Each structure stands twice: as C-alpha cells, then as structure tokens.
C-alpha cells in the first residue's frame, strides 16, 4: 500500500533520495522483460498459486478446526462457551506468539523449507488432537498446533513479495487468502456433518487427514525460490529490523487494521454456533456447519481485491470493507435466519477484502526484512483473532448476540478511525514546505 493510499507520508530532504518504495501500480512491471519473477500466465505461476492456495486451506482448516464444534465440546467436556473458546484462542495465540521467530528462521533457511516443516508439525499434532482426554490437554495441543502453523503466513507473504512481480502481488496474495477462506469453510462444513454422526473427535481427525493431503501436494507443487537471499539469525539484526518496521507509521496502521478486522471475524464465528443452536433457530450441528459455506464469498472477495484496489484505491477498498462488515453485523441482529445468513455473507466479504488489501500492502511497503514485516502483521492479526474469540464469547455470555455484535462494531469503527487519521496525516504532510515523495494511488 502506498503512503497516498492510507494517509502515510514519505518525506525526503534535498539530499539524494534513498531508493523509493516501488510503484504500487506496477506500471513498469509488465514492460520489463528482464524481470524474472513470476507473473500470471508465466512459467510456474499456476503451480505456485495452487500450492499456496492449498497451504492456505490447510492453515485455516487446522487453525479453526474446533470453532464450529464448540457447542459439542462444551457438552462433552462439561465446560462453558467461554472455556471452550480457548481451544480456538490457544491456537491463534500460539501462532501470534511464534510467527516472528518463525519468520526469522525463514530469513535464514528459506521460505519453502520453513513452510514445509511448519505444515509437517501442524498436521502431525492435528492427528493427535482427537485423543485429548480433557480440556487442558486439548488447549495445550491446540497451542502447539498454532505455534507450528506460525511458519506459514509470514513466510508465504514474503515468498510472494520476492518471487512475484509487483503488478501481480495483490492478486497472488488474494489467492492465498482465498485458500484461507476455503480452508476455514471446508473445515467447518466437514466437521459439522461428521460431528453430527460420529462426534467432534472424529470430525477433528478428518480435518487432520485433509490437511495431510494438502501439505503433501503443497510440497510437491511449490516452485523453488529464485530470488531468496539468506539473512542473519543474529538477535541484534532481528531486533533492529523489527524496530525499523514498528517505527514506520504506515506499517503500524496496517497492523492495527488487520488486528481489528480479525477481532470482528474471530468473535462472530466463535459464537455463531451457540446462537444458532438456541431458539428461535435451534439448528442441528450439520446445518450449523453448512452455514460456513458463506466463506465462499470470502474466497471471491479476497481473490478480487486487486481489482477493487484498482478502482477505489486502497483507502477506498478499506472503507468499503469496513462498511460492508458493519452492515453485516447490524443485519445479523435480526431474529430471522435468512437475514442472519445475509449478515454473515456481508461480514465475510468485508473481512476478507480488507484483510487481502492490508496484508498485500505490508509486502509492498517493507523494503527489507519482508518476512519480519509480514510476521508483525500476522502477529497482530492473530492477536485480534484470539481477542475476538475470547471477548466475543464473554460478551455473548453476558449480553447475548447483541453483546458480540457490539464488540464487532467497535472494532470496525477502529478501522475507520485509523484510515481517516492516515488520510489527515497525508494532507498535513502535503501542505508542508518539505518536498514530499508522492506515490500514485
């Protein structure tokens, strides 16, 4: 995302300028035949896209494998909704905690190596989860699984930033995010119907087997990186890189936006199963799992994020994502199943569009330590997921669905405030006498 798009300003003095942020329009990209990075229609692009799509499927299917099953887990283990929600929060919290260290390993040992190892550990743990004898054991296994999955998101984004031409980057990351949505959808739909017949443990085991197949196909399909340069594992270098990224106001805004969007999403989809099992809906587990077919909307909105940015600019795309999400939250308050479903469609579309736009902007903005920049975004993103899962469940316990919606609306307002403040900062910077580097929308 360019500074002009989110309200950040890049200021240079009269001295010779440092290398500028790449033109987000990628205007020179298509005409530069010497650029050996992948582009749509070029060699390896389809294999790469499908491989990372499958990695996204496995990541979200495993990460949220218990989310649609929380009412059954509560009944089987004799725990409350807020207690059961820790099976989701532990996984996303483990990912948030370990994504930065895993990104450092990817800088040293390579993106593909770290992604492969992460998936291998995560699917192995996934096959152990069904045998957890108690809630503490289940939460512990889920935390380990989340920590293992931490090697995927940041490494995948960094891989794409290095191996794909700038013009195609938003679309490529959108396809990876679309894989997330398909994984989240398929995991929940599968577990819903399997659990209705054979219980939540068998359902989680089936998701683990699906993830194994995705992991094997991912490793066979993903092209070897051609533009990766190994970095250092020295803690001092890592700390300096992280400090540089956190000092960038544009990146800070993107991290906050990702966290807030995910707070909404985590809260809604952690609690929705409980709401739909209660009156006036009283749906069986299989139908509740099928509700997650609305994730297909997220697949479409994420994969078309590049075109959305081209028409509205990045700030416009973020406003549209936030507005769509807010409209869905308010619509879901209706005591009508069709209106609740329409609300979930809008929430899902707005969330995945906003996430694809923000995450792709991180890869474009960071000029060094891209894995760490992406890791910080993913850390904030999954902290938002953990917070949304926990706070959303607590709000539901105390105030019903309206309480969960209230948490989501506050998070969406945060996205709007951050984006508006960035726009105002850009205008102030443009009015100063210091020469500003203006980048196209």
Image (cartoon, grey):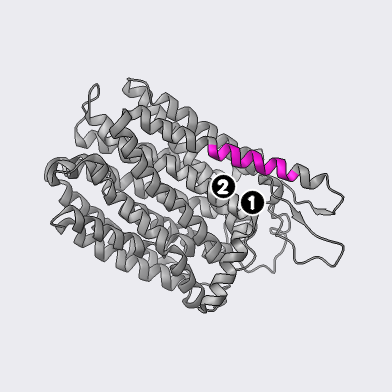
Q: Residue at x 51, y 56 (%)?
A: 377
Residues at marks 1 and 2, CA–CA distance in whole angstroms: 8 Å
- Percent x, y for residue 218? 38, 64
Q: Which residue is mark 2?
A: 357
- Percent x, y for residue 204? 21, 52
Q: Determine whether label 1 and label 2 are within 8 Å by CB.
A: yes
What crowding class fits label 2: few (fewer than 14 Cα within 10 Å), some (14-19), or many (20 or more)?
many
SS at circle 2: helix
- Percent x, y for residue 393? 31, 39
What crowding class fits label 1: few (fewer than 14 Cα within 10 Å), some (14-19), or many (20 or more)?
many
Regarding residue 171, the answer to whether it shows in the image is no
Query: Which residue is nearer to you in this view: 162 or 373?
Result: 373
Regarding residue 333, the answer to whether it shows in the image is yes
What segment is highlighted magenta in the picture? 414-426
The residue furthest front is 398
The quarter of the displayed image where residue 146 is located: bottom left
Q: Residue at x 41, y 28 (%)?
A: 343
Asked if 360 appears above or below 112 in the picture, the reply is above
Residue 192 belongs to the span the image colors magenta = no
Which label's residue is closer to the chain start, 1 or 2? Answer: 1
Disc number at residue 1?
A: 1
The quarter of the displayed image where residue 338 is located: top left
User: Exactly how many numbered labels are in the figure?
Assistant: 2
- Percent x, y for residue 399? 32, 29
């Amino acid at each position: 995302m360019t500074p002009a798009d989110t309200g950040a300003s890049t200021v240079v003095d009269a001295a010779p300028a440092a290398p500028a942020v790449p033109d987000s329009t990628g205007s020179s990209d298509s005409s530069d035949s010497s650029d050996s990075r992948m582009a749509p229609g070029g060699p390896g692009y389809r294999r790469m896209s499908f491989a990372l799509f499958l990695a996204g499927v496995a990541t979200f299917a495993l990460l949220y494998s218990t989310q649609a099953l929380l009412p059954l887990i509560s009944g089987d283990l004799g725990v409350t909704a807020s207690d059961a929600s820790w099976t989701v929060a532990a996984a996303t919290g483990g990912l948030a905690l370990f994504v930065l260290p895993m990104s450092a390993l990817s800088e040293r040992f390579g993106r593909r190596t770290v992604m492969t190892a992460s998936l291998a550990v995560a699917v192995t743990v996934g096959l152990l989860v069904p045998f957890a004898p108690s809630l503490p054991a289940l939460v512990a296994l889920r935390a380990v699984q989340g920590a293992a999955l931490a090697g995927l998101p940041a490494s995948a984004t960094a891989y794409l930033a290095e191996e794909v031409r700038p013009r195609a980057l938003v679309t490529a990351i959108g396809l990876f995010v679309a894989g997330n949505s398909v994984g989240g959808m398929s995991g929940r739909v599968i577990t819903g119907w399997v659990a209705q017949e054979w219980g939540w443990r068998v359902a989680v085991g089936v998701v683990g087997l699906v993830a194994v197949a995705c992991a094997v196909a991912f490793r066979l399909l993903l092209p070897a990186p051609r533009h990766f340069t190994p970095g250092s594992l020295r803690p001092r270098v890592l700390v300096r890189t992280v400090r540089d990224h956190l000092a960038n106001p544009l990146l800070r805004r993107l991290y906050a936006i990702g966290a807030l969007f995910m707070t909404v999403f985590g809260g809604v989809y952690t609690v929705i199963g409980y709401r739909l099992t209660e009156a006036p809906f009283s749906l069986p587990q299989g139908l509740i799992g099928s509700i997650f077919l609305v994730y297909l909307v997220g697949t479409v909105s994420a994969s078309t994020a590049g075109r959305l940015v081209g028409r509205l600019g990045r700030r416009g795309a973020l406003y549209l994502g936030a507005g769509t999400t807010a409209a869905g939250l308010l619509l879901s308050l209706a005591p009508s199943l069709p209106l609740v479903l329409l609300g979930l469609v809008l929430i899902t579309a707005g969330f995945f569009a906003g996430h694809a736009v923000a995450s792709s902007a991180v890869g474009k903005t960071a000029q060094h330590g891209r894995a760490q920049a992406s890791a910080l975004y993913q850390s904030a993103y999954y902290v938002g997921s953990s917070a949304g899962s926990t706070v959303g469940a607590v709000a539901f316990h105390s105030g019903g669905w309206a309480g969960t919606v209230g948490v989501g609306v506050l998070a969406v307002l945060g996205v709007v405030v951050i984006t508006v403040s960035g726009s105002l900062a850009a205008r102030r910077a443009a009015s100063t006498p210091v020469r500003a580097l203006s980048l196209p929308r």
